[in-house]
């Protein structure tokens, strides 16, 4: 349903306040062919009313001819910043970048963040942004989960459907996504609300069963029957099952890149205002599936790159798969049990 401008301006004001935007800060709003006009106009209004100096930088889309999907998260590779010295300079000089186009991870984005610029991605439709406008409580919950994850040396994931995956930890940091950017050099995504890390290089082993009803992204579909992934030394070595497995195999094969099969980020959802069922109500063109990535109690794993965490794997293929009903243990202690987050005792 539509959202009024004033509601979206209020939501932006909350996000920008949580992001500690100050009078006189320089804000660059990044746009491209797919930027939502109301999200853009309300972002500019809210930041201007708070006294920021606001510029808009429109970048040309890339990779459209290479990607098999229209989803903006489906194909990584080069970005509109690749070789774009003047745009990089503008972003490095900004205090805050509002990414309304999906810039995605790249060496250039790391360079911008290293300069102290904060980047906030916001591309879901206005009503999704307003429903999941972040709060300080969202951050507190994600931060508590991060403290647990930072101390852990192994994540063990099991489910009644047959998942049994062991991921040694410690090589990569725990990354918090809570929907606003309150530290210099921080990247975040509105809406979100989850915690993630990467398994130690080449060390994840076991099997993952994507059960009927679990969501595949960027396919933006619910699996109609189980898909079984065999994981050996950090890579998926077999994808077995019915039609959904065949579709996944064919899509991943199209990248012709063995790195696509690496286990990428692993973590769990902590956002109570995100719902597993939302994807069934939306056209695929209308959403990138953040409800699916963030809903409370999912185990979200992915296949593909690790450059977001400082690794060297930059494959263009990136699949996110949130599973329901999993138990996630850190060094033997359950933090999610059968799809329920066990963090009340830490509140
Ligand atoms: Fe991902």
Image: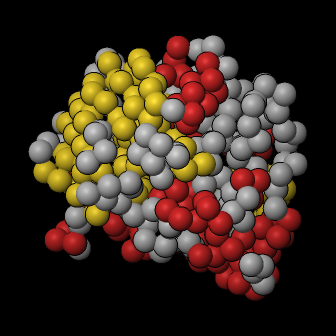
- What x and y, as percent, mark residue 343? 23, 66
Name the side, left or right, on which 200 lies relative to 122. left
Q: Is residue 307 placed above or below 100 in the rendered structure?
A: above
Q: Residue at x 84, y 38 (%)?
A: 61
Instruction: Note whether 158 is above or below 77 in the view shown.
Output: below
Tell me which residue sits at (61%, 19%) in the image: 253
Please name whichever residue, 42 or 239, is drawn nearer the observer in this view of the structure.
Answer: 239
Percent from the top left, x then y, of residue 148? 22, 52
Number of numbered tags placed on the structure image: 0
**In the image, farthest residue toward the left:** 332
Quarter of the image where the N terminus is located: bottom right
The quadrant of the rendering that contains the C terminus is bottom left
Residue 6 horizontal side relative to residue 60, left or right: left
Instruction: Say whether residue 48 is visible.
Output: no
Q: Is residue 38 visible?
A: yes
Where residue 305 appears, as percent x and y from the top left, is: 52, 28
Task: Please name the residue shown 61% across and 61% down the image.
Answer: 280
Q: How is the image coloured?
A: secondary structure
Who is closer to the viewer here, 65 or 50? 65
Quadrant of res 10: bottom right
> What percent of the width, then of the height, locates residue 111?
61, 34
Query: Residue at left 71%, top 43%?
Result: 72
Q: Quadrant of residue 344?
A: bottom left
């Amino acid at each position: 349903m539509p959202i009024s401008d004033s509601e979206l301006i209020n939501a932006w004001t909350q996000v920008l306040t949580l992001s500690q935007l100050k009078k006189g800060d320089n804000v660059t709003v990044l746009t491209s062919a797919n930027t939502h006009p109301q999200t853009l106009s309300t972002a500019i209004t809210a930041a201007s009313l708070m006294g920021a100096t606001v510029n808009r930088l429109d970048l040309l889309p890339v990779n459209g001819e290479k990607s098999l999907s229209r989803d903006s998260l489906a194909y990584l590779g080069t970005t509109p910043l690749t070789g774009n010295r003047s745009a990089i300079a503008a972003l490095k000089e900004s205090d805050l970048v509002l990414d309304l186009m999906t810039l995605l991870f790249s060496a250039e984005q790391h360079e911008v963040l290293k300069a102290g610029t904060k980047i906030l991605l916001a591309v879901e439709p206005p009503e999704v942004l307003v429903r999941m406008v972040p709060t300080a409580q969202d951050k507190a919950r994600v931060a508590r989960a991060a403290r647990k994850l930072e101390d852990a040396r192994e994540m063990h994931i099991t489910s009644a459907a047959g998942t049994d995956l062991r991921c040694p930890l410690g090589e990569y940091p725990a990354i918090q996504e809570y929907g606003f950017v309150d530290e210099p050099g921080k990247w975040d995504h509105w809406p979100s609300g989850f915690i993630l890390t990467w398994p130690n290089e080449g060390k994840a082993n076991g099997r993952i069963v994507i059960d009927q009803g679990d969501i595949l992204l960027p396919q933006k579909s619910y699996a109609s029957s189980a898909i079984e992934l065999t994981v050996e030394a950090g890579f998926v070595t077999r994808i077995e099952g019915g039609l959904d497995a065949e579709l996944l195999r064919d899509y991943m094969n199209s990248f012709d890149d063995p790195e696509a099969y690496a286990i990428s980020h692993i973590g769990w959802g902590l956002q109570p205002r995100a719902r597993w069922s939302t994807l069934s109500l939306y056209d695929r063109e209308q959403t990138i599936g953040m409800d699916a990535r963030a809903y409370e109690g999912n185990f979200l794993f992915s296949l593909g790159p690790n450059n977001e965490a400082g690794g060297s794997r930059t494959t263009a293929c990136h699949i996110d798969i949130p599973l329901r009903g999993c138990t996630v243990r850190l060094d033997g202690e359950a933090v999610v049990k059968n799809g329920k987050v066990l963090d009340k005792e830490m509140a």
